[in-house]
Amino acid sequence: MRIVVDDIAASKTGALSILKDFYNYVLNCEKEHEWIFVLGDDLLEEKENVKVLIRKDVKQDRINRLRFDLKTGSEYFSQLKPDVLFSLQNTLPGGYKGPQVLYVHQPLGYQTLKKFSLLKSEEREYAIYQYFIGRLIDSSVKRADKVIVQTEWMKRAVIKKTGISEDKIVKVLPDIIVPFETDEEVRSYENGNTVNFFYPAGEILYKNHACIIEAVGILREKGIYNFSVSFTMDKGDLTYLNRYPSYEQIKYIGRIPRKEVFGRYRDEVLIFPSYIETFGYPPAEARAMGGNIIASDCEFCREVLRGYDKVTYFDPFKPEQLANVMEDIIIHGIKYITDIKENSDMQMKVDKGCSWQRVAEIIKSVKGAV
């Protein structure tokens, strides 16, 4: 069986992680099939059962990308003669007629909390995705034989907006892999009497770093200084943050290894003020570590953290609420756990590739597959 994977859009952050996770599953568990990955850059290695085709020309500019998505891509993928076309990039090539499965992980067109403006420079890119690319995603959803999403809220939102039948869309919860075999492997990041807060997120506007900075300012006005907040990016990565004051409590630590991220989940307090996510990996990962969490009171956080008792919610548009929660933790301290595996009633999967196995089964079950 020949399966062509379309992910020309993948280049960084979450989209790249999804691509690499699926690729690794295919290498290890789907060797009996022929897989062709069509990418926009040199991101993966060819192996015995995996061929990689690079289309850098498609990513040269937005016009090339639109032309490919709307017209020329259909002919290109048809020439590859796939039994199934699997798109990991939220959209399908316009006019393509063969069996196709769509993986949707772009929430901008389905969330209702924020309307981005084309007139504001820092919001323009998000507005394009919300209003224009969002229409391409909706059209792709309607044409796909099967649609895969990560959460129940996305499933409901996609059905409501596009009108597709419920049996056409499948929720597949992503795997959460704890990168430690034993508790002893978890490095300690405790720091005396100072409470450390932690936010692992990239330089994206709706990740809402500004809310944390404003909350830090409120705490300082109250005379509270014995805490720190670590951002996993470099200072200046988000230029709009330059309008906010610089506080010594905020540490820009840059990208850090995955094991360090998970160690901090246990020993520090995750602040998650993002208000737009499909799934929200940091809250799910911190939950798997039994960590303390301050989370935005949004549908995706409520779903991921349902039944978890070491979380406090706040309105992500009200930094004073966040400051109050942080103050309470600074004064009363945080709870530590002894066993990282005794913490969740959510199915946090430790058998690698469990969710991708389900995705592969859906792909192979599509009508017309052989």
Image: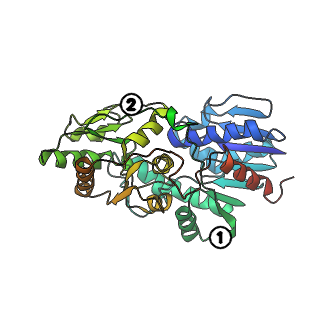
Q: Quadrant of residue 80?
A: top right
Q: Earlier in the sequence, mark 2 or mark 1?
A: 1
| Residue 232 shows in the view | yes
Instruction: Left or right? Give the position of 245 relative to 339.
Output: left
3D distance between C-alphas at marks 2 and 1: 42 Å
**The disc labelled 2 sits on which kind of residue?**
Gly
Instruction: Determine the secondary structure under disc 1.
Output: helix
31, 366: nearer the viewer: 31
Judging by the rendered image, the residue that carries numbered circle 2 is 254
Instruction: Determine the secondary structure under disc 2.
Output: loop
| Residue 201 shows in the view | no
Q: Is residue 113 above or below residue 284?
A: below
How packed mark 1 is, by other alpha carbons closer than 10 Å (few <14, some 14-19, many 20 or more), is few
**The disc labelled 1 sits on which kind of residue?**
Glu
Please report the residue visible at 47 percent of the width from the left and 58 percent of the height from the top: 305
Instruction: Left or right? Give the position of 161 relative to 358.
Output: left
Please report the residue visible at 41 percent of the width from the left and 61 percent of the height from the top: 298
Judging by the rendered image, the residue that carries numbered circle 1 is 166
User: Residue 183: image x %, image y %?
Assistant: 51, 38
Instruction: Tell me the quadrant of the picture where the N terminus can be found.
Output: top right
User: Residue 189: image x %, image y %?
Assistant: 38, 34
How packed mark 2 is, by other alpha carbons closer than 10 Å (few <14, some 14-19, many 20 or more), is some
Please report the residue visible at 50 percent of the width from the left and 57 percent of the height from the top: 304
Q: Is residue 310 above or below residue 205?
A: below
Q: How many marks?
A: 2
User: Residue 286: image x %, image y %?
Assistant: 46, 47
204, 54: nearer the viewer: 204
Please report the residue visible at 79 percent of the width from the left and 57 percent of the height from the top: 365
Q: Quadrant of residue 68?
A: top right
- Tell me which colouring the rendered structure shows: rainbow
Q: Residue furthest right?
A: 370
